[in-house]
Amino acid sequence: MNTKIRCPWSETHELFTPYHDKEWGTPEHDDRMLFEMLNLEGAQAGLSWLTVLKKRENYRKAFDTFDAKKIIKYTDAKKEQLMQNEGIIRNRLKIAAVIENARAFLTVQKEHGSFNKYIWSFVNNKTIPHSKREEAMAISEVMSKELKKRGFKFVGATICFAFMQAVGMVNDHSPECFKYKK
């Protein structure tokens, strides 16, 4: 029997394994998906990734599949509706952050042609290997400062590093993991 060796964390909950195998650490270049992941990582602040992962489908429904053009049109009534939605994390600041992030995201798209082009420029369009984790952490600090200057919310250095791991900007799979060399 040929069993895959995975990062140890990915086998601690049934939701983690498919997320690890299909998404985490895989280079992502789709603008909408990058926007979703940046906001989900922000929603995680002070919580566990498992909490967010369990609510991910609810987030997609609540925030119009993270369509930034729709999100920027949210009214106060829509914000209140989101505050009542038990399927997401009901934190007023985190909900407001998604709306502010949508505005900033659309501005970046307009200025750079795509959010992908902008965000991947922090790593010169190449995944940083696990062996250069310290370099990746330093880049997450720069990314955080730049995103904040542009009006993004819930994008501290720790959140940016988690985002970089999730979207494959840094390969932080353990060296034994089957995804490490991919």
Image (cartoon, grey):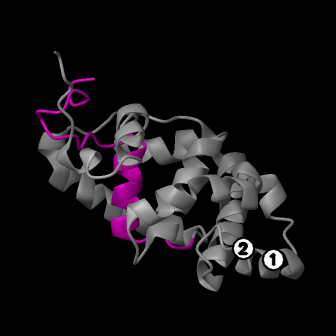
Query: Which quadrant holds the N terminus?
Result: top left
The rendered magenta stretch, by its main secondary structure, is classed as: loop
Name the residue at 42% across, 32% down: 22
Marks 1 and 2: CB-CB under 8 Å?
yes
Above or below: residue 1 compared with residue 168: above
Name the residue at 53% across, 46% down: 118
Q: Quadrant of residue 169?
A: top left
Residue that label 2 marks: 85
User: CA separation, marks 1 and 2?
Assistant: 6 Å
Q: Whole-percent x and y of residue 87?
A: 65, 67
Q: Quadrant of residue 78?
A: bottom right
Q: Amino acid at mark 1?
A: Gln
Name the residue at 85% across, 81% down: 76
The magenta segment: 153-182
The answer to whether residue 38 shows anywhere in this view is yes
In the rendered image, residue 177 lying in the magenta stretch gets the answer yes
Residue that label 1 marks: 81
Above or below: residue 81 compared with residue 33: below
Q: Amino acid at mark 2?
A: Asn
User: Please, what secondary structure does the residue beneath circle 2 have?
Assistant: loop
140 sits to left or right of 104: left
Query: Which quadrant holds the C terminus?
Result: top left
**In the image shown, does 149 or 78 lie closer to the viewer?**
78
